[in-house]
Amino acid sequence: MKWLWAILTALAVCACNSISDIQPSDSESKLMNATQAIKSRYPQATQIQFKTLVNELLWNATFTQLSIAYQTQVNATGIVSAVLKRLDPGFTPYQRLTDQLSIRGGTFSDLWAVDADTSSTRLMAYTLQGTTYQLTYNESATGKPVINLSPLPLYAITSLPELPQRIQAFFSTNSTRLRFQSGQVIQRASGPITYWLTAVYQAGYSTSPTTILLFFDEMGNLTWSGCNATNTPVLYKPNSQVGDATLLATTSARYPGFDQSSSLAFETYYDGLVSVRYVFQRPIATTTESWEVGAQWPTGQLVYTTYRAN
């Protein structure tokens, strides 16, 4: 009888394992919810594929509907970012613009529009001198073309738990003052990732709902701040009045021909970190080109660069 009991026990264990094996994992359940969310908005979606961005928290989703490719980001509850729709690669109108600018000579790829957005906004990749940027095109209220250039993001941050614990702790410590809004994960070449985040002042802390830029390294350490640690307002000055002459000369040498006399520069102070913003401008015809550069003082470490033509 002992041998019969052993066989029955083994069969029971096998049966339990078989039942367990067919139960969806927590991750699979989340993706099933995300799939249903996509299907509810895009009922003819096929070839739905997911790629993990933040383990158990955030996925990139790609799919096709009526031969059009789409991509977005999802979490356990569904779609959490804009749905991008791939467009035919008609880059001629944008190249006509860049050909008139200092960023001329790059190559375009991957043209996208925000699905259901009737504005002129277009997103595309733009590779210039070996670096691939995200070029964003839109039009001002008067119909004037506006071009922004920034590092091509790996993905967008949609909620605070998707960030490293150290960054979460930063916002927890500053919860009465700052509220996380959004962000992007950036990686230059094969280097470490960085977090480009935006925050806003909490209600009652500031007289205006100012959007603040904050940059963190891969470990979650603050590397550049667009606000002061105290309630001291940011003061905008000419480039020559922030940082020092050496830092200004070294930084401006990267942008020959750009005027250094704008009054959009500033310094901020945050727990020993001194952050400097320079803005180098060059007016041409009816357009003004601007490079915005964030650096640490006195180390001179460059933290970010962005470009704008408007």
Image (cartoon, rainbow, N blue to C red):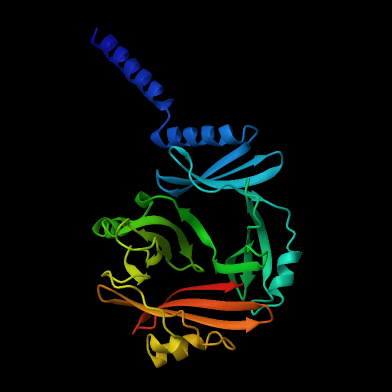
**In the rendered image, which quarter contains the N terminus?**
top left
**In the rendered image, which quarter contains the C terminus?**
bottom right
**Where 2 sits versus 147, above or below?**
above
Residues 198 and 157: in front is 198
| Extreme residue toward the front, this view | 207
Q: Position of residue 252 (x, y in %)?
A: 50, 87
Q: Position of residue 259 (x, y in %)?
A: 55, 87
Question: Image point 46% across, 79% down: which residue?
Answer: 264
Question: Image point 67% across, 67% down: which residue?
Answer: 144
How many discs appear? 0
Residues 6 and 230: in front is 230
Quarter of the view holding residue 4: top left
Side of 36 relative to 224 (left or right): right
**Where 1 sits versus 28, above or below?**
above
**Where 30 sits versus 185, above or below?**
above
Q: Position of residue 68 (x, y in %)?
A: 69, 44
Quarter of the view holding residue 166: bottom left
Residues 124 and 164: in front is 124
Side of 285 relative to 10 (left or right): right
Looking at the image, can residue 8 be seen? yes
Question: Image point 33% across, 73% down: which residue?
Answer: 233
| Extreme residue toward the top, this view | 1
Q: Position of residue 18 (x, y in %)?
A: 40, 22
**Where 278 sits versus 167, above or below?**
below
Looking at the image, can residue 275 be seen? no
Question: Image point 57% across, 47% down: which residue?
Answer: 83
